[in-house]
């Protein structure tokens, strides 16, 4: 029997969820009632990275301006304004502040090339086996630890007195209170997932000053109140609390997986696909490291044992190259044509580092097919089918490996985030995994953000099971049953594996 929802107080003003993604940000209002949680978007704004002097930056001041505009819109939409604010975003990137609290240049984008060679420098001091045993984080060339090693000796890091991860930087500008939220901190590769504290031997060995980071705080902890200047800028009436949520957007998204029991796998889809299972303790084995699995910290003491997969970045970059709008009007005809295309005609390794950088994605996909002796896609529909088949295969591999490495047998796969709207991808994932796929909610990160705020404010009570039960009250979910020939997916997976060894 699933836990019953637990609304502790009469429904009041909604909470504002600031959800920052790699291509856009939005501010959403989440109202909690005894029937569930309802969301409405009040403001959306673009997130356009900028290349200056050969370095790719985030335009973080424009992002902050979008947050202020969104809070102003939230105040106009609700009598009395929002009951509170929570912020989530992508992981690993950070801003540096000087001794006065001033920003030392725009944060560098994780897709920038500055970390080239940093992993080798780290491995010379801490072999990958030792680094993984201490932190449980999968090797990705843009992890914060590599960014900091790449920045060593530079004037900005030398002048820095504070380092704030992106959602913590936004919260600091809103409140004047500096903190380091734990779920995002765990992605830096500087946290011990067993103690849920800094991995000080790792930082000491690499010459990284942990004093740059403000104190750790957990989801649900207070993060300050809006400053008088922010209240004046947004028109909100204080006090307005800011609460630390699962500030890594995947942590918030997984908190909002509407599963009725713990035997589920999740795929949080967007620019990246984060595919894995929820555990009570990390898996720090050498086998797990070799499988490139990560142990990121989640809400309520959980561990997100997952693999980062390239995700819908592949499709987004193709649409950008073709000047096709990334919305229903542009995407629907392409997906319909892709659904009619020959399945598994050609597949690529969706996790290949060759796909990380922006630009020329369709040509790179065609080139990868050609280099492995497969038929090359002949038109846009076949490119889309190739990349979606390939992404479903990557989902399959991650779900199978997560079960094998953790010992948790799952009964269903939950796809949350933007990819939950892509019915073809959801069906292909069900076919590839041989498991039912439950699609939704698409706005999982914002929902998880709101739930943690509501619980911290006393509007709801209970653990993740109770929050998820409450969440299911107003959700419309779609279930995709596996179909087709499983052996075809086995053969396609073998083709990808062989290509990866060449």
Image (cartoon, helix red, strand yellow):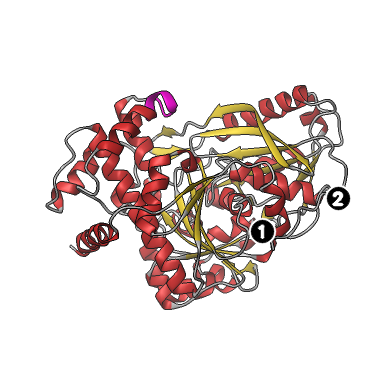
Measured as percent of width and height from the top left, residue 33 is found at: 79, 41
Left or right, 443 with reference to 149: right
In the image, farthest residue toward the left? 373
Residue 461, x across and y down, in percent: 81, 55
- In space, the residues marked 2 and 1 are separated at their CA atoms by 20 Å
What quarter of the picture does the C terminus occupy? Answer: bottom left
Q: Which residue is mark 2?
A: 8
Residue at 76% over, 22% down: 76
**How far across and how far down the image is residue 304, in percent?**
55, 62
Whether residue 125 is visible = no
Q: Label 1 neighbourhood size at 10 Å, few (<14), some (14-19), many (20+)? A: many
The residue positioned 60% from the left and 45% from the top of the image is 445
Q: Which residues are magenta?
A: 325-331
Q: Above or below — where is 44 with respect to 402?
A: above
* Depth order, front residue of 351/7: 7
Which quadrant would the N terminus be assigned to in this image? bottom right
Q: Nearer the viewer, residue 173 or 420?
A: 420
Residue at 88%, 42% (x, y): give it.
Answer: 10
């Amino acid at each position: 029997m699933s836990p019953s929802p637990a609304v502790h107080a009469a429904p009041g003003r909604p909470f504002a969820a600031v959800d920052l993604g790699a291509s856009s940000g939005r501010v959403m209002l989440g109202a909690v009632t005894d029937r569930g949680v309802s969301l409405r978007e009040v403001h959306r704004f673009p997130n356009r990275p900028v290349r200056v002097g050969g370095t790719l930056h985030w335009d973080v001041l424009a992002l902050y301006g979008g947050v202020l505009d969104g809070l102003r819109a939230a105040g106009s939409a609700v009598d009395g304004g929002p009951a509170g604010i929570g912020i989530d975003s992508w992981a690993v990137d950070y801003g540096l502040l000087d001794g006065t609290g001033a920003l030392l240049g725009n944060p560098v984008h994780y897709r920038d090339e500055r970390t080239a060679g940093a992993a080798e420098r780290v491995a010379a001091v801490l072999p990958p086996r030792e680094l993984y045993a201490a932190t449980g984080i999968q090797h990705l060339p843009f992890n914060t630890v590599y960014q900091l090693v790449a920045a060593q000796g530079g004037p900005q890091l030398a002048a820095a007195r504070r380092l704030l991860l992106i959602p913590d930087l936004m919260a600091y500008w809103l409140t004047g209170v500096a903190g380091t939220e734990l779920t995002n901190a765990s992605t830096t590769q500087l946290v011990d997932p067993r103690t849920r504290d800094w991995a000080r031997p790792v930082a000491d060995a690499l010459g990284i000053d942990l004093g740059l980071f403000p104190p750790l705080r957990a989801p649900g902890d207070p993060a300050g109140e809006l400053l008088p200047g922010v209240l004046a800028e947004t028109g909100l009436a204080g006090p307005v609390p800011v609460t630390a949520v699962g500030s890594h957007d995947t942590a918030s998204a997984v908190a909002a997986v509407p599963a009725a029991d713990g035997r589920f796998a999740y795929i949080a889809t967007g620019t990246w696909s984060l595919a894995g299972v929820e555990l009570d303790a990390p898996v720090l084995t050498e086998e797990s490291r070799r499988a490139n699995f990560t142990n990121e910290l989640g809400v309520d003491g959980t561990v997100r044992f997952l693999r980062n997969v390239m995700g819908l970045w592949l499709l987004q970059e193709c649409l950008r190259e073709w000047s096709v709008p990334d919305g229903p009007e542009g995407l629907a005809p392409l997906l319909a044509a892709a659904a009619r295309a020959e399945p598994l005609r050609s597949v690529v390794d969706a996790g290949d580092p060759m796909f990380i950088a922006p630009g020329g994605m369709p040509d790179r996909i065609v080139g990868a097919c050609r280099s492995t002796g497969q038929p090359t896609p002949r038109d846009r529909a076949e490119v889309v089918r190739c990349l979606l088949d390939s992404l479903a295969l990557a989902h399959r591999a991650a779900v199978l490996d997560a079960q094998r490495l953790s010992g948790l047998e799952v009964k269903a796969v939950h796809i949350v985030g933007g990819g939950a709207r892509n019915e073809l991808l959801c069906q292909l994932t069900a076919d590839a995994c041989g498991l039912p796929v439950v699609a939704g909610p698409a706005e999982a990160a914002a929902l998880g953000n709101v739930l943690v705020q509501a619980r911290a404010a006393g509007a709801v009570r209970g653990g993740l099971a109770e929050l998820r039960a409450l969440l299911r009250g107003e959700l419309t979910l779609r279930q995709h049953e596996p179909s087709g020939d499983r052996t075809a997916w086995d053969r396609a997976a073998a083709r990808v594996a062989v290509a990866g060894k060449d």
